[in-house]
Image (tube, rainbow, N blue to C red):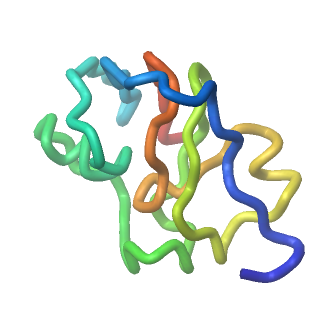
Amino acid sequence: MQESRAPAYAGPAGVATEKVTIELDRTTTTVAYSAGDTLLQTARMAGLAPPSSCEVGSCGTCMARLTEGCARMLNNDALEVDEVAEGWVLTCQALPTSATVRVVYE
């Protein structure tokens, strides 16, 4: 990982994620979260078709903005520090770390 890249902010330790709300194509879907799934996997399990490509954190196709809650990225080779600070995550690499998470695909 390059020095200019940064992971998303992690939430409080030991907090289990219960639900994820996903805004995609002007539709809002809230689903129960399955431990260990990325935000991209969670969206797919909800029957949604969010944008994605490489699925290893390199291209940025799956980027979305966290508007509620926290997540940590396993890998980030696409987003700059300022983008992460603004709430952007790579959903293919983002694991929720707060009780609730809201992600918006813009």
Say left or right for 42 vs 23.
left
Q: How many marks?
A: 0
Residue 9 placement: quadrant: top right
Using the rendered view, name the quadrant where residue 11 is placed.
top right
Q: Residue at x 13, y 42 (%)?
A: 45
Quarter holding the N terminus? bottom right
Percent across and percent down for residue 75 are 56, 69
Give the vertical position of 35 relative to 13 (above or below): below
Judge left or right: residue 100 versus residue 70.
left
Relative to 59, is 99 on the left or the right? Answer: left
Look at the image and tell me in which quarter the C terminus lies. top right
Question: Which residue is nearer to you in this view: 29 or 42?
Answer: 42
Q: Position of residue 62 (x, y in %)?
A: 46, 59
Q: Residue at x 79, y 52 (%)?
A: 83
- Work out which residue is located at the far front of the displayed protein and give it: 14
What residue appears at the point 79 percent right and 69 percent down from the top-left corner? 5
Against 9, residue 100 (above or below) is above
* Identity of the residue drawn at 40% across and 80% down: 54
Report x, y in % for residue 12. 62, 25
